């Protein structure tokens, strides 16, 4: 891909300065190959191509620096930020070496209560569905549908049906659901998917940003003020004990405004000292964006021209 080929789209808004636009890319799990029962996954092969393109054609910045530059109207041309949610061990084992190979930085939002052997509820759902015998799968918790599982297609549909239902259960019901799935899986339950304390410390020492993502990945808008404040502040304290840098960035679990977080949530995030926060609202940040509701988007393209085209088009048509 030559520089000339990029010229027709290069004059768009990623030129920097007062009218700059900042793409913040969102990642979750990183695997060597795709798992049909897991969404929000990037393979190492795709990340390698994306990082190679980003390091050549864009300026990947630490998020805290980029947000400050954006606010002050001095964001450099073609700035981009990378973020990873939840605190998966594969972020340390697979994503970190790729970032280091290309000289890039990223911010990792860590759910502190799941460190050292915890497991995300949707990973339990995937494994429960994967190992369930053919027939009707009933987790046995009110509000969670009974699903049919047989072939791979039905199991994919089952995961898609169960995940949003479990996600929005009240806290006691969700805990009961998690416990039932752990018991059903027994020795097959995933126990090493998340980072441990040492991984978080190592990521920070390697120059990566560490951000808050609550203690238990609860939907903050569904919690009381006291519960939400605890999830946010305790998470900050947990992570602060593992790194030697201030925590400035927060990511709302699930990240949809009103549904997953609200104005009360934002006040708690600000009260914990976070200077900015990211959502999962699809879009690109500008100088007019609210610093505690910065949009992000997922980049799935893997060829250089498609990656560059997508990033530049998002600055004009963020949909």
Image (spheres, helix red, strand yellow):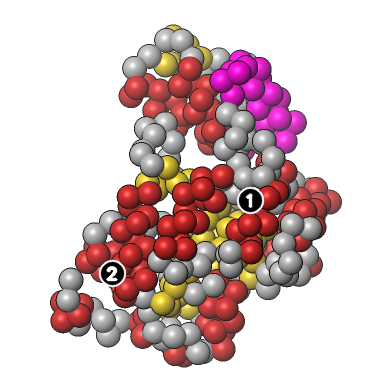
95 vs 101: above or below: above
Secondary structure of the residue carrying tag 2 is helix
Q: Earlier in the sequence, mark 2 or mark 1?
A: 1
147 vs 67: above or below: above
The C terminus: image quadrant: bottom left
Q: Which mark is residue 199?
A: 1
Left or right of residue 164: residue 48: left
- The answer to whether any part of residue 114 appears in the image is yes
Q: Which of the 4 image quarters holds residue 2?
A: bottom left
Looking at the picture, how far across and down is residue 314, in whole percent?
35, 69
Q: Which mark is residue 308?
A: 2
Is residue 16 part of the magenta span, yes or no? no
Residue at x-position 31% and y-position 58%: 49
85 vs 25: above or below: above
Residue at x-position 51% and y-position 48%: 93
- Please report the bounds of the magenta region as a residue range: 166-189
Looking at the picture, how far across and down is residue 29, in whole percent?
48, 46
45 vs 32: above or below: below
Q: Which of the 4 image quarters holds residue 297?
A: bottom left
- The answer to whether any part of residue 261 appears in the image is no
Q: CA distance from mark 2 to mark 1?
A: 32 Å
Mark 2 vs mark 1: in front: 1
């Amino acid at each position: 891909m030559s520089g000339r080929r990029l010229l027709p789209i290069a004059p768009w808004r990623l030129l920097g300065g007062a009218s700059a636009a900042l793409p913040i890319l969102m990642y979750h799990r990183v695997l060597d190959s795709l798992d049909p029962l897991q969404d929000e996954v990037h393979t190492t092969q795709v990340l390698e191509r994306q990082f190679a393109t980003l390091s050549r054609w864009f300026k990947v910045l630490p998020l805290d620096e980029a947000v400050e530059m954006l606010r002050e109207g001095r964001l450099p041309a073609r700035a981009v930020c990378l973020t990873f949610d939840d605190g998966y061990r594969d972020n340390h084992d697979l994503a970190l070496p790729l970032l280091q190979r290309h000289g890039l930085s990223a911010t990792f939002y860590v759910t502190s209560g799941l460190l050292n052997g915890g497991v995300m509820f949707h990973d339990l759902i995937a494994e429960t569905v994967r190992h369930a015998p053919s027939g009707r799968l009933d987790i046995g918790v009110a509000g969670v549908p009974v699903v049919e599982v047989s072939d791979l297609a039905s199991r994919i549909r089952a995961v898609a049906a169960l995940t949003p239902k479990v996600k929005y259960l009240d806290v006691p019901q969700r805990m009961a659901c998690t416990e039932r799935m752990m018991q059903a899986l027994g020795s097959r339950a995933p126990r090493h998917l998340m980072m441990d304390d040492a991984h978080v410390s190592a990521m920070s020492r390697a120059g990566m940003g560490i951000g808050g993502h609550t203690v238990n990945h609860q939907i903050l808008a569904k919690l009381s003020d006291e519960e939400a404040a605890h999830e946010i502040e305790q998470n900050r304290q947990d992570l602060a004990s593992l790194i030697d840098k201030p925590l400035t960035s927060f990511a709302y679990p699930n990240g949809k405004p009103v549904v997953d977080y609200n104005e009360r949530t934002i006040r708690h995030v600000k009260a914990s000292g976070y200077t900015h926060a990211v959502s999962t609202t699809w879009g690109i940040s500008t100088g007019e964006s609210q610093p505690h509701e910065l949009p992000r988007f997922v980049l799935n393209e893997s060829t250089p021209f498609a990656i560059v085209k997508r990033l530049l088009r998002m600055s004009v048509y963020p949909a």
